[in-house]
Image (cartoon, helix red, strand yellow):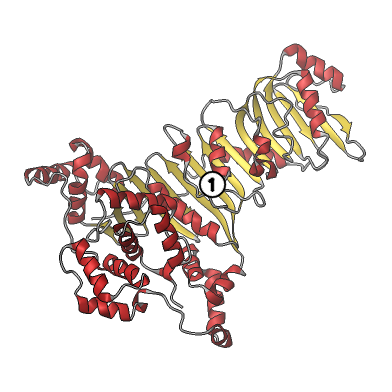
Amino acid sequence: MPTSSTLDKHLLKGYLFCLYHQGVSRADAYSNLLEFTKTEVFTHEEFRELFHDFSIGNYNLNTYSNLVLAENGVFQDSAVLEFLTYRYSSTFFSELYNEVLKITGKPLFTKDEIKDWSEKIFKKNHFRMELRREFNKIALMGFLICLKVQNKSAKEAHSNLLEVTRQEVVDLEKVEALFKDTTHYFVQEDFTEELWKAVHQYHIMEKIVFFADLDVRKSLHQTGGWIRDLIDTHPYEIDCINIDFSNDHIQIKSDPKIPQQKFQNFFGCGCVVHSGNQVYLEKIQHDFHYKCHLKRILRKISSLENITIGSLKLRANLTRVRASELDIFPTETLRITNFYLKVDIFHAILNFMGSFSPDHLKKLVVWVTGNLRFVPRGMEEIAQWTASEVLITNQRFDDFGNGEALEHFKFAIFQLHYVVTIDQILAIKDNLLKHPDLREFKITAQMLPDHYDEINIRLGTYNQRGTQTPRWAQFPYPNEAKTLELTVLENLVWFRGPEYIPGECEAAEQELVGVEELNETVFEDYDYSR
């Protein structure tokens, strides 16, 4: 059967534009399209942007939303000139060169060339001009297919389209031909499940599914039938996904499952996409549209139930941190085992963990570049936090209490912002005695000199400042033949549990240092030419 979700997105935009023209609300249009496609093609954010464009006249059926700037890694002068024409109205004259340089990554175009082109644009009164194009034929077909689905006649559909275009761009004969056969616009399965399984093609498809990258796997899954079942029964693990996120761009890469892609934000202009050797501008006048690309990629992962991610490594290099700006993950559940994060404030982790499956998340490694304190109280109410077994961070926690929010971790390295007391140390010890699966807790914290001496006397360890071979106090677990070890050194409170693994702490500390340089050597520079 034809599968509507495999249709071209320009066609589906035409389909939605038809619904908008009929006065259908955004919510009803979303439900209508979902019923037609069977799977979500546009996110709620994309829907909101599309309907906003419809309402202010930024989209119509003669709009091509993409301007191709480079093919096969080669930038075309005419495309860059059109970009300047499109961008001229919302950018200072002096910034145009920097914006082109931001896209090309190296000075393929000189300042004099950009200046000369900009002056020509101004003299020709192209201010706010965008080059007009012919009607988007695929979008027109989407408009007509929407009417066919509503059981309109070809004559009615032709008349409705004429109302919108105000000129005949598709004659009645072509509309009638379309209404007789729309399969040209679908991906269609031509064979029954039994026939496919009876011949070698089924086994070939098994191999294709096994080696397919994310896009191919998702496209095959949308065709439905036995191919969907085949994909659902073949586990698929992505070892690592690297994401670099800043105020003006996002990069993502996962060899070989997700090819390197870059999405650059141009406020008031749209998003420049670098994918393979192609560079194109998406003309969408919404700030932060560039995040939708990342959400779309991650949504593909979350929608395929058998896909798991070994490690997600995210560097959030932001000049300002607000909750709205950290909204880069879909609401659907991602099956991630290890989460590595480099960010300005630890609180940002709350914006991400809600998208993770508690059944899969095991380790959190967070390098914080700022100096803001974080109060962990209440974190124990977050399922993803309490499901994690390992926490490794340089964060200084405040109002730590007796460690209730962190005591569930089997292994943890962190810091305290304030001076720790003897009573607190002993209370933390008592809480950890509730967890016989503990491996190690290493807490960096300041302590008053008198308290340091007193705690060592009370523990019977008598550790001196600067000692290289600390002595450990031992405490039995209730009703178990297991012990908890504790040593207090200068600026350090250190616990070892029954499941202590020699060398794990040293490896974790090296891992944390590595997160300080997270993703710095992962992404390759694009080698464009002109």
Q: Is residue 118 left or right of residue 14?
A: left
Position in image of residue 434 (x %, y %)? 82, 36
Q: Is residue 235 left or right of residue 275?
A: right
Position in image of residue 509 (x %, y %)? 64, 37
Position in image of residue 231 (x %, y %)? 57, 70
Label 1 sits on what residue type?
Answer: Lys
Res 136 quadrant in image: bottom left
Q: Is residue 282 left or right of residue 507?
A: left
Position in image of residue 219 (x %, y %)? 46, 68
Residue 317 visible in image: no
Q: Is residue 379 left or right of residue 343?
A: right
User: Helix, strand or loop at disc 1?
Assistant: strand
Name the residue that disc number 1 marks: 313
Residue 142 visible in image: yes
Q: Nearer the viewer, residue 476 or 520?
A: 476
Residue sitting at x 51%, y 69%: 221
Res 465 quadrant in image: top right
Q: Nearer the viewer, residue 270 or 28?
A: 28
Residue sitting at x 22%, y 39%: 91
Residue sitting at x 75%, y 30%: 494
